[in-house]
Image (cartoon, rainbow, N blue to C red):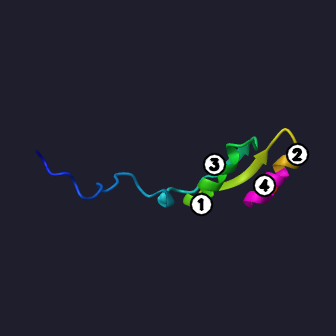
Amino acid sequence: MPAFPLTLPTPRTPPSMDAPPLRWGVLGTGWIAEPFVASVQRHTRQRFTAVASRAAGRAKAFAERHGIPAG
């Protein structure tokens, strides 16, 4: 029986911080948008540049919470 490996194999995917930055827009500020934007901002160099919602106030508040420029 082969021995069980003591360490995980080296990943074959490049680090997410090495991906070229893209500009993203958020359509809808529902519950899934909050953790998605926070995770992308925390773990990549991607940039969010626009937010849209059925209510302008929700879009503005979302943009302010996540540091997305108004525009």
Find the magenta span and give its range.
60-68
Three-letter code for the amino acid on which mark 2 is drawn: Ala
Q: Is residue 69 visible?
A: no
Which residue is labeled 3 in the image? 36
- For label 1, the SS is helix
Q: Earlier in the sequence, mark 2 or mark 1?
A: 1
Tell whether position 58 is magenta: no
Whole-angstrom CA distance, mark 2 to mark 1, is: 26 Å
Q: Classify residue 39 by image quadrant.
A: bottom right
Foreground label between 2 and 1: 1
Whole-angstrom CA distance, mark 4 to mark 2, is: 11 Å
Q: Is residue 1 left or right of residue 43?
A: left
* Number of other residues with Cα within 10 Å of mark 3, as a class: few under 14, some 14 to 19, many 20 or more: few
Which residue is labeled 2 in the image? 56
Q: Residue at x 65, y 50 (%)?
A: 35
Three-letter code for the amino acid on which mark 3 is drawn: Phe
Residue 23 sits above or below residue 29 on the image: below
* Number of other residues with Cα within 10 Å of mark 4, as a class: few under 14, some 14 to 19, many 20 or more: many
- For label 3, the SS is helix
Residue 68 sits above or below residue 52 on the image: below
Whole-angstrom CA distance, mark 4 to mark 1, is: 16 Å
- For label 2, the SS is helix
Which residue is labeled 4 in the image? 63
* Number of other residues with Cα within 10 Å of mark 2, as a class: few under 14, some 14 to 19, many 20 or more: few
Expressed as whole percent of the image width and height from the top left, the position of residue 4 reads: 20, 51
